[in-house]
């Protein structure tokens, strides 16, 4: 997910930048006016735009969103401190995907972005079969933007369910696939992968330690929960004595 920030208040621009990077999305850039925003979009089109309603330049955020809709069809989250009826009605006609009022908390911003990502992911399910994530016996070919990235199954540390999606964690990178945890389980080798929690599937070959008191599994750089329901099955598989 590539994100562009259009914000002329430095404090909020910094806050938006920090959270985008914390959530591990790709930041296309930060601009404070309509001309630079259009130039940036034409140069490197983002997947999502976080935009203040009141920005510098020839166009305000609402007018800029109208131009973007006509030329690029990129979803916009509007950010504003003032949203009177007139402004709201103008903004609504630009069909933003979300409104975020200043001042906002980190969690409000995070949820608005994540909800938007999920909504866009749902729409992406209509893509042709060749654009979907591809699984084989030894590798996954995961769609990352317009490329299929080869990921060795042996390099996967664990998977975490997120509704209809799964996050796949390797030691180097995190991926998001449009498959449920159960669908991933059906595609990965049962000899190596085991469920430890309703939302987690782990590669047992990557386990470093198992904390039986606090019920978690420690990998080199990760830690995942171990539910009582799945603990006995895991210990039997590992020939625990």
Image (tube, rainbow, N blue to C red):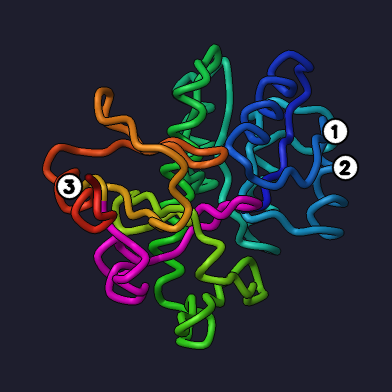
Q: Residue at x 62, y 52 (%)?
A: 173
Q: Helix, strand, or loop for circle 2? A: helix
Q: Residue 84 magenta-drawn?
A: no
Q: Helix, strand, or loop for circle 1? A: loop
Number of residues whose C-alpha sits closer than 10 Å to that of mark 3, classed few (under 14), some (14–19) or many (20 or more)? some
User: At which x and y percent is residue 225?
Assistant: 31, 36
Number of residues whose C-alpha sits closer than 10 Å to that of mark 1, classed few (under 14), some (14–19) or many (20 or more)? some
Instruction: Name the residue tied to disc 3.
Output: 230
Q: Residue furthest front?
A: 241
Instruction: Name the residue tied to disc 1.
Output: 57
What label does residue 36 carry, if any?
2
User: At which x and y percent is residue 80?
Assistant: 58, 22
- Chain-order first, disc 3 or disc 2: 2
- Chain-order first, disc 1 or disc 3: 1
User: Is there a contact, CB below 8 Å, between mark 2 and mark 1?
Assistant: yes
User: At which x and y percent is residue 221?
Assistant: 56, 38
- Between the C-alphas of marks 1 and 3, the distance is 58 Å
Count of marks placed on residues: 3
What label does residue 37 carry, if any?
none
Residues rendered magenta in the picture? 169-195
Picture layout, residue 210 above or below residue 41: above
Picture layout, residue 110 above or below residue 138: above
State the residue in front, 86 or 236.
236
User: At which x and y percent is residue 54?
Assistant: 69, 25
Q: Residue 171 magenta-drawn?
A: yes
Q: Is residue 22 left or right of residue 132?
A: right
């Amino acid at each position: 997910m590539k994100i562009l920030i259009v914000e002329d208040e430095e404090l909020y621009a910094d806050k938006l930048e920090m959270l985008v990077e914390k959530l591990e999305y790709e930041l296309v850039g930060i601009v404070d006016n309509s001309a630079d925003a259009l130039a940036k979009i034409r140069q490197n089109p983002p997947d999502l735009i976080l935009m203040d309603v009141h920005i510098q330049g020839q166009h305000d955020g609402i007018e800029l969103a109208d131009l973007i809709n006509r030329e690029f069809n990129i979803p916009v989250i509007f950010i504003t401190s003032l949203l009177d009826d007139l402004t709201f009605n103008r903004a609504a006609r630009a069909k933003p995907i979300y409104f975020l009022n200043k001042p906002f908390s980190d969690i409000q911003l995070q949820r608005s972005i994540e909800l938007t990502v999920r909504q866009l992911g749902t729409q992406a399910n209509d893509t042709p079969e060749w654009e979907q994530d591809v699984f084989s016996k030894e590798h996954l070919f995961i769609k990352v933007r317009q490329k299929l990235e080869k990921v060795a199954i042996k390099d996967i540390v664990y998977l975490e369910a997120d509704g209809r999606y799964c996050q796949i964690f390797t030691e180097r990178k995190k991926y998001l696939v449009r498959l449920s945890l159960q669908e991933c389980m059906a595609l990965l080798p049962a000899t190596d992968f085991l469920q430890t929690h309703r939302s987690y599937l782990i590669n047992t070959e990557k386990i470093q330690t198992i904390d039986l008191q606090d019920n978690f599994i420690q990998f080199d750089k990760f830690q995942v929960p171990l539910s009582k329901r799945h603990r006995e099955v895991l210990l039997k598989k590992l020939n625990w004595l």
